[in-house]
Amino acid sequence: MQVQTTRKRARNRAEALIKAPWWEELREEPPRAGSVTINVEYTTCVEAYVSLRILRKLFTGASIMALSTLGKLVVCLLFVSSTAVAQYGQTHSIVLGVDVTTEPRPTIRLSWPADERADQYQIWKTERGQVFGAVAATLPKDAREWTDTSVVVGKAYDYRVGKQCRTQAGQPYVGFGYTMAGIGAIPSERRRVLMIVDTTMGPLLANELATYEADLRAEGFVVTRRSAARTEAFSGEAVETVRDLIKEEHQNGGRDLTHIVLIGRIAVPYSGNIAPDAHVPDHKGAWPADGIYGDIDGEYTDFFATFENTQRPNQDQKPGDGKYDQDLWASDVEIAVGRIDFFDLPGSGKSELELLKQYFVKNHAYRTGEIQVDRSVIVDDNFSSFPEGFSISAWSSLSSFGGSQSISSGKLFTNALEQPAKLFLYGCGPGSFTSAGGIGSSADFVDKPVYGIFSYLFGSYFGDWDTRDNFMRMAVAASPSILTCGWSGRPHWFSHPMAMGETIGYVALKAQNNSATISEYPPSLQIEQGTLIPYVGFARYIHIALMGDPTLRASQGQTGKIGSLTGSYVYPNKVQLQWTAANNADGYIVYRRRGANPRATLLTPVPVTELTYMDSTVFNGEQTYTVVPVRLQTFASGTFYDVGERSSINVVTTDVEEETPALSLRVNVSPNPATSVINVEYVSDGSKTRLDVVTMTGSVIVSTVAADNATIGTQRQTFSVHDWAPGRYIVRVTNGRETATALLTVQR
C-alpha cells in the first residue's frame, strides 16, 4: 500500500509539473550551468513525463522523492545523454580511509575528506552480518575522523559514516561511506558449493572443472557437482527441474549450501512484469532471474502476469507460460548464485567451449596469484549529472581494499589496459544490449585487453543479460582477467565485506535481500528534507544477478592443507586433536559440529599456532571437528585470516560427565525484541559473576554483580528498558574465566 501511495504521489507531482506554463517553453530554453542536458526520444518512451525543467525542479526541491521513487518516472534516464557538472556519485558518497592499531589497545580509526557543505556527520557500527542500530557518534561539520576503541581482536565490524549537507541554494542532501574493518578477523565459515554443469559442456571441461574443484577445496569449501540438461531456448519445465535439484541438495546436504555455480547453458528463469531501466514498453515484461534458484523456500507462481512485448518476445508474460509472476523475491534469497555462461556470444570470435576453457584458466590464475592485482578502482561514470548517483556503488565502499587514494575516475578502455589488473572496475552510461555510452561496446572487450577482476556495469537494456553479445557477459568472456560482472546502480551493490574475506556471492546476496525498509544500505538514493528515504522502486527486484563465479574473493593465493589429523576422547569430558603443519599457514581455527547439525561452533575465535587443541566442552554422542589452516591477509581496512582447505574427523564420546558443562556460563534474554522490560536468565557455577548490558559501540549502560560465590545454578534479573534508545544491545555475563553473551533488540 505504501509503494502504491508513493507512486501515486510521484505521478501526480510529475503531471502537475507538466501542466505548468513553462512546459511549452522548454524547447526554447538553453541549458544552464550545472543542469542536465537531455535528448529523449519521446516516441520510444511512452511515460517520459520529465524533461530538463522537471529534473531541475524535482531534484532541487523538497519533492525530489517524486522522481527517484518511481523508475517509470525517471524519464528514460538510462538512455539519455548528459553533460555533467555535478558529480552526484561522489557528492552522495564518502570515501573512507581506515587505520588499525593493536598497541596500546586495539583501535580502528576512520577518516574522510573535508566537505565544506557538511552540517554534521554520524557514525554507525555493528558486527559482521548484523544490522545497524542506534547512532554510535554524532560529530560536528569540521570532523575528519573518528576512532573506535571498543574493538575485539578476531572480529570484523561494519561501519557506516553519514553526512548531512546543504547545497549552495540551501537544499539538503546526504552522503554515505561504508567499510568493513577488523584486526585478525575470522571470516564467515565457507561451507558447501554446488556446481551445476551443462550436460553437453561437462565432459568437454573435465580438466578445467577438476582444477576448479581443487581450487575451491583449497579455499575451504566442500564441493558437490551435479549435471543439468543444456537448455538454449526458454523452458519453464527445465527451470523447475533445476530448482528441484537444488532443493534436493539443500535438504539432503543438511542445509549447509552457501553458493551455487551455474556452468554452461543451464535453464534461465524469467519472472515479473518490470522495467528496472525505465524503458516502457519496449523493455518491460519478464526479466532473467537467476536468484530464484537461491530462494529455497520462496513460492513463485505463474497465474496472472500478462504483458506482450513486441520488440523482445522473450519478455512476453502470459499465465501458464513458465515465466513467474513475481516482480520481487518471494522471500529472502538464501544461497548466492553466479552464472558462467557464454552461450550466444558470436561477437567474441570464439566458441562457447573456448570461452568456458578460457574463463577457468584465468579463474585459476587469479586465485593462485599468477595475475597481478594492485587493489585499485577505476570509476567510469557517464551518468554523473543524475542525482540518483549510480556510481555511489563504487565511491561509497570500494576504498576498503586499497585505501582512499586507490579509487579514481577514469575510462575503462583507456586506464585499465595495462597490468597490474585493477581489483574493481565500475562503469555506467546510456546503454543498449551491447554497449554503454561513454564506455564502449561489446566489441571493445574483444579488441582491447582490459585488466580488471570484479566489474560493475550499469546502463539501459544490458542489465537484461540473456541476450546476444550482451555487454555484461562479454565483459566476463573477455581476456585476460575480468571474472565477474553485476548491474549495479538500480539497486546499489556494496562490496566492502570482501575486504574482510567475504565472497562476491556474499555481496550479490546482500544486494538481492537489501530491503527498502532498512536505510542502512540505501538501494537507491532519494532525499526529502534532508532525510534519506530508501527507494522502494528497485529493492529486492528479481533482476539482480551475478555473472561469473560467486565464490571468488578479493584475496589471492592459497594456504596449504594440514596432514594426519587425529582426535581422541579423553575421559571424562575432553577431546584431544592433533595435526601436522600446513604450508603457508599462520595459524589454525577449529570448528565443532554436534551430530547432523550443519551449523558449526567456532572453538578458536583467535587462531591457535600450536598443532594441537583440547576441547573441554564436549557432549555425549558424535562430534565432528574441522581444522582449517589460515593465513593473515592485509587490506586497507585491516587484517583478516583467509582460510585454506579443511580437514575433518569424527569423534564419538560416551559417558561424558554432564554436570560440569551443565553449569557452564550461559545467558538468555526475554522478551526479545523488548519494549518495556527484559528478563535476564543466566547460569552460574558459583563464582562471582558480573552482568553487563552494552551498546553496539561498547558503552556500558547496566553493570551489576549478578551472583556471589554462594550462589550456584540458574539466576534471574529484571530490567526496565523504557529509557533505552531503540536498537541492538549486548547482554554479557562473565565470571573471570568464561564470558557468555546474548543479543537484545529494543523496539518502540
Image (cartoon, rainbow, N blue to C red):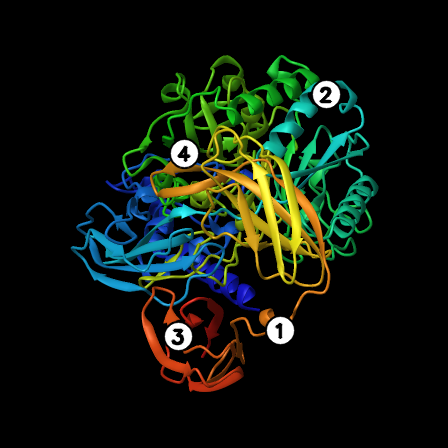
Say if residue 442 shows up in the picture.
yes
Which of pointers 2 and 1 indicates the residue nearer the eye? Answer: 1
Question: Sequence-wise, which precedes: disc 4 or disc 3?
Answer: 4
Most foreground residue, 119 or 680: 680
Most foreground residue, 177 or 169: 177
Secondary structure, mark 4, is loop
Q: Where is residue 120 in the image (x, y as percent from the top left)?
A: 22, 60
Secondary structure, mark 1, is helix
Amino acid type at circle 3 is Val
Question: Sequence-wise, which precedes: disc 2 or disc 4?
Answer: 4
Most foreground residue, 42 or 395: 395
Q: Where is residue 529 in the image (x, y as percent from the top left)?
A: 32, 64
Residue at 49% of width from left, 80% of height from top?
674
Separation of disc 1 and disc 3 at Cα? 28 Å
Question: Sequence-wise, which precedes: disc 1 or disc 3?
Answer: 1
Question: Sequence-wise, which precedes: disc 4 or disc 1?
Answer: 4
Residue at the disc numbered 4: 81
Separation of disc 4 and disc 3 at Cα? 55 Å
Secondary structure, mark 3, is strand
Say if residue 77 shows up in the picture.
no
- Split into 4 quadrants, where in the image is the C terminus? bottom left
Q: Where is residue 466 in the image (x, y as percent from the top left)?
A: 66, 33
Residue at 61% of width from left, 37% of height from top?
464
Residue at the disc numbered 3: 693
Residue at the disc numbered 1: 659
- Split into 4 quadrants, where in the image is the N terminus? bottom right
Secondary structure, mark 2, is helix
Amino acid type at circle 2 is Leu
Question: Sequence-wise, which precedes: disc 2 or disc 1?
Answer: 2
Q: Is residue 441 left or right of residue 175?
A: right
Q: In the figure, residue 98 lies in which quadrant?
A: top left
